[in-house]
Amino acid sequence: MIRYSRWLLLGFALLLALPIVITGLAFYNLATVETADLVIGTPLVVTPTPTAAATATPDATTNYLAGMAAYNAGDYALAEQQFRAALALLPNEANWRNSLGLTLVRLERTGEAVTEFETAVSLDPALAEAHYNLGAAYHAQTRLLEAERAYQTALAIVPDMALAYNGLGNLYTQTGRAAEALVAYEQAVVHDRTLIAAQINLGVAYANAGNLEGARVVLEAAVSLAPDSAEAHHSLGVVYTFLGDTERAQQEFDLASGLIGNE
């Protein structure tokens, strides 16, 4: 197992003949939390909550829904403006705080986002998505103990939240807890087989544990689910390399290179 792990860590040395853009891809993307992985709201985000329905003014609801439309259109500055207008009229809506927090993440104002997520969970301690988002924001700030607690809280509320398991796996990987990371990634995939980030992370975790066959199976599933994922193809190519299947490895590297070239 140690031997395999060392080989995998040295894997890029074998790929120097590939285009620089491919060899520059990290073999594993295990210790980062992408803002795209943050969840927006809950099943109630597009309508007032039962409490708010009786008290929200039409303006507050209109502002919030306009904020959601702007967020989904990628106009985060307008989304922030509309969410703040809604919250000025109804400041205790946890869902709305959560949505504002996500908008601030998109605007790369993580510190302000943390404040909104913290407010959201204080207003509604059962809002699992806000706990997850808070964990991801803490993680981005390298506040790892707080991030772990927030992920665990989200899972205590919603035990099948795959994103939270994937976040924990990233955190455990970052802190050298490889066995715990592997278990967390396994749980993420069990609960959501369409979560490609978790599929890739699990495949790499298997490979680094010396289970190359397990890595192959998981990464083949990942490229089947996400044929446009350059990272999935590249990671599978590395695994094929160490399995001695150089022809299939080259095919995967070529696919990854083509996908990157089209971005």
Image: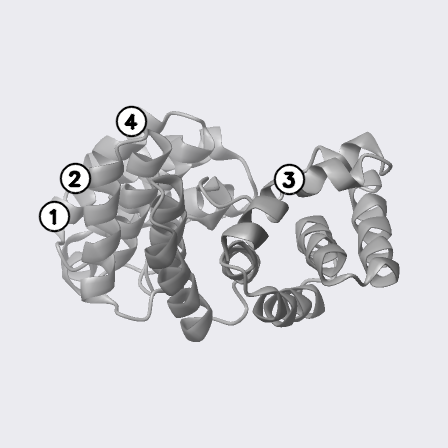
Find out whether the residues at labels 1 and 2 contact each other: C-beta distance under 8 Å. yes
x, y (%) of residue 137? Answer: 33, 37
Which label belongs to residue 10? 3
For the C terminus, the image quarter is: top right
- Could you tell me which residue is drawn at 74 percent across and 60 percent down? 240
Question: From the viewer's perspective, is 32 left or right of 219?
Answer: left
Kindly identify which residue carries mark 2: 119
User: What secondary structure is found at the residue carrying circle 1?
Assistant: helix
Q: Residues within 10 Å of mark 3 (few under 14, many from 20)?
A: few
- At label 2, the amino acid type is Thr
- Rounded to the nearest angstrom, the CA distance separating label 1 from label 4 is 17 Å
Find out whether the residues at labels 1 and 4 contact each other: C-beta distance under 8 Å. no
- Could you tell me which residue is drawn at 42 percent across and 61 percent down? 185
> Which quadrant holds residue 16?
top right
- At label 3, the amino acid type is Leu
Kindly identify which residue carries mark 1: 123
Kindly identify which residue carries mark 4: 112
The foreground one among 49 and 224 is 224
- At label 4, the amino acid type is Glu
- Rounded to the nearest angstrom, the CA distance separating label 3 from label 2 is 45 Å
Give the mark nearer the N terminus: 1 vs 4.
4
The foreground one among 119 and 8 is 8
- Rounded to the nearest angstrom, the CA distance separating label 3 from label 4 is 40 Å
